Amino acid sequence: MEQQSMDVSKLLERITINPDICHGKPCIRRLRYPVDMILELLSAGMSNEEILADSEDLELEDILAVLAFATRLSQVKRVHAVVR
């Protein structure tokens, strides 16, 4: 279990947030591949292999990092409404 946590932490290092890249959206390795775009491709049915074939500078670990990042986001304990 400890090894798995370390592996996930290493994967999450691939997700970067920079206000000068894609308007500060979480991206893969400072490249212009936003996390949400990769999630959309996966949810549309594209395989890892198809995504990697279309994007030569991506690696399988990048897709795994996107999934790990999305998993962490979904583990939010509580959501509060914002009143405007």
Image (cartoon, rainbow, N blue to C red):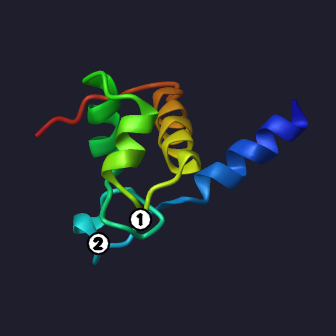
Compared across the picture, whether 17 is left or right of 75 comes to left
- In screen coordinates, is 63 left or right of 39? right
Residue at the far bottom in the pictured view: 20
Query: Which quadrant does the N terminus fall into?
Result: top right
Q: Position of residue 15 (x, y in %)?
A: 50, 57
Find residue 17 and name its label: 1
Q: Quadrant of the C terminus?
A: top left
The quarter of the picture where residue 47 lies is top left
Disc 2 crowd, CA 10 A, few/some/many (<14, 14-19, 20+) = some
Task: Identify the residue at horizontal 52%, vertical 25% (top origin).
Answer: 77
Position above or below: 41 against 10: above
Q: What percent of the width, then of the height, locates residue 41?
A: 28, 34
Crowd band around label 1 with a 10 angstrom C-alpha radius: few (<14), some (14–19), many (20+): some
Comparing 17 with 81, the one in front is: 17
Which residue bears the numbered disc 2?
21
Q: Is residue 17 left or right of residue 60?
A: left
Q: Secondary structure at mark 2?
A: loop
Q: Which residue is rendered at x = 80% and y = 36% of the image?
A: 4
- Give the residue type that dot 2 points to: Ile
From this viewpoint, which residue is outermost toward the front? Answer: 53
Single out the residue that lies furthest toward the left: 84
Query: Which quadrant would residue 28 be assigned to in this image?
Result: bottom left
As drawn, 65 above or below 23 = above
In the rendered image, residue 72, in percent from the top left (x then y), is placed at 54, 35
Cα separation, mark 1 vs mark 2, equals: 8 Å
Q: Is residue 6 above or below residue 27?
A: above
Total labels drawn = 2
